[in-house]
Image: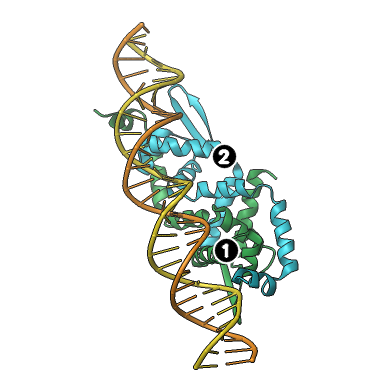
Chain colours: A green, B cyan, C yellow, D orange
Amino acid sequence: MTPSETCEVFCVNAPKVKAVTQELSAQKNIIDLAETFKLLGDPTRLKIILALRMGELCVCDLATTLGLSRSAISHQLRLLRNLRLVKFRREGKISFYSLDDSHIAAIIDSAMEHIGE
Amino acid sequence: MTPSETCEVFCVNAPKVKAVTQELSAQKNIIDLAETFKLLGDPTRLKIILALRMGELCVCDLATTLGLSRSAISHQLRLLRNLRLVKFRREGKISFYSLDDSHIAAIIDSAMEHIGE
DNA sequence: TTAACGATTGAGCACTTGTTCACATGTTGA
DNA sequence: TCAACATGTGAACAAGTGCTCAATCGTTAA
């Protein structure tokens, strides 16, 4: 009898595990949720979000503000676009980016409260 | 004159960049914030959080629920503990974990609204 | 049409990360 | 004290990630 078998027999609170397992499998969008948090979990992307909270900015201004190359910013913006965290409009040669969704500010506010400030 | 120099001269909205840069540097806790989101950005850890939202669970029950080894769960719980996303109490040989902070549920709720469900 | 230029993209890489494995720790009951 | 067992931890490795570099795209103005 392996340790894990032992554990299943003697340690597990079976009804609770069953309930939680069912609840988790009912959550169809856990992966999407994790994907969203992962995007916010990188300092560069989080700074982009925080910067755009103050108003729309072009790629070049974001690069200057964050001290990174425009290529690096553009790569990250694509990821943020794909998950609809940011949107953009084009004006001639320049792309202006802004937040796509008011929920994003709410997410960040909640997290800041957790951090405690 | 390199392209980036050109960009700084002709593309940047200088006052806005300056304002945003100052605002970002005033945010002392961006790294902590990103660290918190990064923890929520892994499916395993997010499932742990969602499971604990239904009540405290021991390591073994979490491992059974998520279909992972107890070692893997334990490693992740340590990370969650370090950032005070979860807390635990010990009862004999068994550690019971639970959410450490009501803000976490709020963060997740906001994010779920963003996903759209 | 052409040059200029902001933005985008793919390849490549150094670095990070989540898991497994083996072992250590700490508590319980005999 | 000793065996059993839930949990914790360090090393190692495969997979994933963020940046740079070079090339390309798309728009503007001459």
- The amino acid pointed to by label 1 is Ser
Report the residue at 35% width, 41% height from top. Answer: B68
Q: Which sits in the foreground, B92 or C26?
A: C26
Residue B54 location in percent, x, y?
49, 42
Report the residue at 52% width, 31% height from top. Answer: B88
Residue A83 location in percent, x, y?
50, 64
Q: Which mark is residue B1?
A: none
The chain that hosts pointer 2 is B
Q: Residues within 10 Å of mark 2 (few under 14, many from 20)?
A: some
Q: Which residue is mark 1?
A: A69
Residue B2 location in percent, x, y?
60, 70
Q: Which sits in the foreground, D28 or B64?
A: D28
CA gap, disc 1 to disc 2? 31 Å
Report the residue at 46% width, 58% height from top. Answer: A32
Q: Residues within 10 Å of mark 1 (few under 14, many from 20)?
A: some
Q: Determine whether, in the image, residue A14 is placed left or right of residue B10.
A: left
Q: Residue furthest front?
A: B1
